[in-house]
Image (cartoon, rainbow, N blue to C red):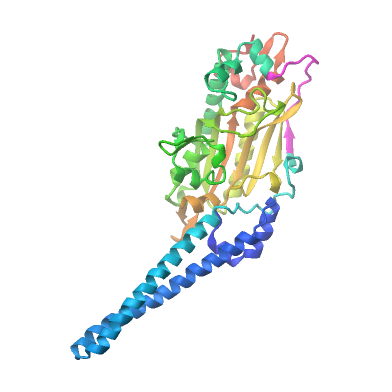
Amino acid sequence: MLTLKAITEHPEEIIRRLATKHFDAADIIGKVIEADRTRRNSQTVLDENLSELNRLSKSIGLLMKEGRTQEAEAARAQVAATKERNTALEVTKSLSEQELHNLLVLIPNLPHESVPEGKAAEDNVTEKTGGVVPALPADALPHWELAKKYDLIDFELGVKIAGAGFPVYKGYGSRLQRALINFFLDNAREAGYLEIQPPYVVNADSGYGTGQLPDKEGQMYHADLDDLYLIPTAEVPVTNLYRDVILNESDLPVKNTAYSACFRREAGSYGKDVRGLNRLHQFDKVEIVRIDTPEHSYASLQEMVDYVQSLVDKLELPWRILRLCGGDMSFTSALTFDFEVYSAAQKRWLEVSSVSNFESYQANRLKCRYRDANKNMQLCHTLNGSALALPRIVAALLENNQTPEGIRIPKALVPYTGFEVIN
């Protein structure tokens, strides 16, 4: 979340920048400033009263020694009245602190100055493109038909077992999934990322730390009895490794990668754009996470974008990179680049990765800090990216590489699949 210091010192700047995300912050910023004023005023009076209580307590002993009983009793009455006022002030202070917290978690992260204006996905800016869109015949099949033809994925069986959005992978389909996971993890490790195997459930503190709670509570699966949430991405448990941790500047950047299953309710998703693998409730993904200094975090972001580009290049997929506009950005992001690959049979672009810098927004929630060269404590910057999410990668691989002889496997992936063609 945004720091209280930034809000109280630069309220107009905060309001201006959040307008890029189409978030009208004027009212809530005003409430934050008022709640902070109440908290500080209460604390000031409490401090003054404490000083007065100390003075009165000392005077009572002296008055009693001098036999000035009546004055001592008056001082005792004053002490009692002051303590009663302090009790009320403590309540006021506590309520204002709780109100402050409740307000701060509702304020999105500030967008970076380079975030373009715009309300929705169509306003995103194409930064870069690459790869070659294959020329498929008119009778080319979409991936859900190819999955059925080659017995790779059974969507109906998944509905029987769990419901829509929980496909069952079979045979070559299962092997392709496993090959992609290992391919992404090996590439990440070679790029200097330490592999983590995280839990697939997290507590509320972890969800709060990375900003899924309370913003995305309705999109997460919740195990009520144990008050645990199924993870929507490995970003949540991996970033929370550094919750309440103080790092040394020499330790940064921290680079982690993790494979996990991901679970998302995706409430309200329907229609042709979610058919097949286009949108699922459970899917596999390899994530990369970085913890860095504010001075270096945007260089890290560019390195992560370049790294994801190298993956789609190796998979021989046509791709484009989008700089997200303010209206299409997540609640927690300061700057996000989306990667999309072209699905030649569906004739549409499919998002396969988001690479984001959250600056200090998550770190402030996580209390993730580092000691700089002068031993001063600073908030870290956190970053993460999909590298990569499997479902739409699989969709594009199946569709773009279909031939009369079968589905061709990209050269870089063959050592992982153990086969060159699905037929």
Residue 91, picture quadrant: bottom left
- Residue 212, percent across and down? 54, 43
Number of marks in picture: 0
The furthest residue to the right: 138
Q: Nearer the viewer, residue 142 or 352?
A: 142
Above or below, comparing residue 334 to residue 151 in the picture: below
Above or below, comparing residue 268 to residue 13 in the picture: above
Q: Nearer the viewer, residue 27 or 263?
A: 27
Q: Is residue 423 left or right of residue 169?
A: right
- Residue 185, percent across and down? 52, 29
Residue at image point 50% right, 40% down: 236
- Residue 362, percent across and down? 53, 49
Residue at image point 62% right, 13% down: 420
Above or below, comparing residue 395 to residue 221 in the picture: above
- Residue 254, percent across and down? 49, 44
Q: Is residue 69 left or right of residue 288?
A: left
Residue at image point 70% right, 18% down: 401
Give the magenta-colored segment's residue range. 128-143
Residue at image point 45% right, 32% down: 197
Q: Is residue 368 left or right of residue 387?
A: left
Q: Is residue 29 left or right of residue 69?
A: right
What is the quadrant of the C terminus in the image? top right
Residue 138, picture quadrant: top right
